[in-house]
Amino acid sequence: MSRVLIVEDEQHLAEGLRFNLEAEGYEVEVLDNGEDAFALLTAKPGAFDLVVLDVMLPGKDGFAVASELRQANQFVPILMLTARGRPEDVLQGFAAGADDYLPKPFELAILLARIRSLLRRREWLQPAQESDPNVFVVDGRTIDLNSLELRMGDETLRLTLMEAKLLRYLIEHEGRTVSRKTILQDVWDLHEDTDTRAIDNFIVRLRRYLEQEPTRPRHLLTVRGVGYRFVRESGAA
Ligand code: CA
């Protein structure tokens, strides 16, 4: 049974969500503020399979909770409830480490579908196999998209689902230039006229993971005025 933590300060909404998620067979816990959520999630890593995280919370808001969890190496999937569906809010949520978002007000059926999809994606990413199509080696770094880990020597970094999704996308399009707009559509499912430069923040993070010298990338190349190209062998650049 999947365990879901709801962080929502509107009591009616929180209890409505609890009722419906329990009816779907999930085990549910509800908190009404970000401080308690952060404390619980860091005290009990692995206790929850998913967090439904409201952005507008008293005290620590949802963006802060998400980014502090990621900084604390807590990578539980986060479905963020944004007050507005503006692309800037959505992208701020992703930049903070959310895996998916839903603007309020939302249809219950959509929320349930998004939750199922996130939990399923987590399952897909988990089973490891030998000679695994989800494991890549770039410049001495092993990228394991099953465990969302990047290993280099003794060091292990954790990727968020969105970082892993973007990285997978770039690797699958190896050698080809992909535009920012295409990335937004294919990786984030955003079709609006979004400020595509927000992707650049993700690329900066991925370069820190992948590149010997992040400011002089040899794998995650910028194609000026267009987008990005991933090159596995730096000699091919
Ligand atoms: Ca709220």
Image (cartoon, rainbow, N blue to C red):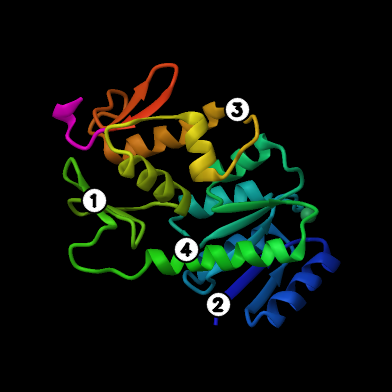
| Res 108 quadrant in image | bottom right
Which numbered disc covers residue 121? 4
For the residue marked with disc 4, what is the amino acid? Arg
For the residue marked with disc 3, what is the amino acid? Asp
Q: Which residue corresponds to the image point at 55% horizontal and 28% vertical from the top-left? A: 196
Q: Which residue is mark 3?
A: 195
The earlier-in-sequence mark between 3 and 4 is 4
Please tell me whether mark 2 or mark 1 is closer to you in this view: 1
Which numbered disc covers residue 2? 2
Q: Which residue corresponds to the image point at 47% horizontal and 63% vertical from the top-left? A: 121
Dot 2 and dot 3 residues touching (CB under 8 Å): no
- Residue 232: say if magenta: yes
The earlier-in-sequence mark between 1 and 4 is 4
What is the quadrant of the C terminus in the image? top left
Q: Is residue 183 left or right of residue 190?
A: left
Q: Seen from this angle, which residue lies furthest left?
A: 235
- What is the secondary structure assignment of the residue under circle 2? loop
Characterize the local packing of mark 4: few (<14), some (14-19) or many (20 or more) Cα atoms within 10 angstroms. few
For the residue marked with disc 2, what is the amino acid? Ser
What is the span of residues highlighted in magenta in the rendered image? 231-237
* Separation of marks 2 and 4 at Cα, in angstroms: 13 Å
Mark 3 C-beta to ligand 1 under 8 Å: no
How far across and down, in percent of the image, does residue 220 sit? 31, 32
Please tell me whether mark 2 or mark 4 is closer to you in this view: 4
* Separation of marks 2 and 1 at Cα, in angstroms: 29 Å
How far across and down, in percent of the image, does residue 111 sit? 69, 62
Q: Which residue is mark 1?
A: 136
Dot 2 and dot 4 residues touching (CB under 8 Å): no
What is the quadrant of the N terminus in the image? bottom right
Q: Ligand 1 is found in which quarter of the picture?
A: bottom right
Q: Which residue corresponds to the image point at 71% horizontal and 82% vertical from the top-left? A: 23
How far across and down, in percent of the image, does residue 59 sit? 73, 51
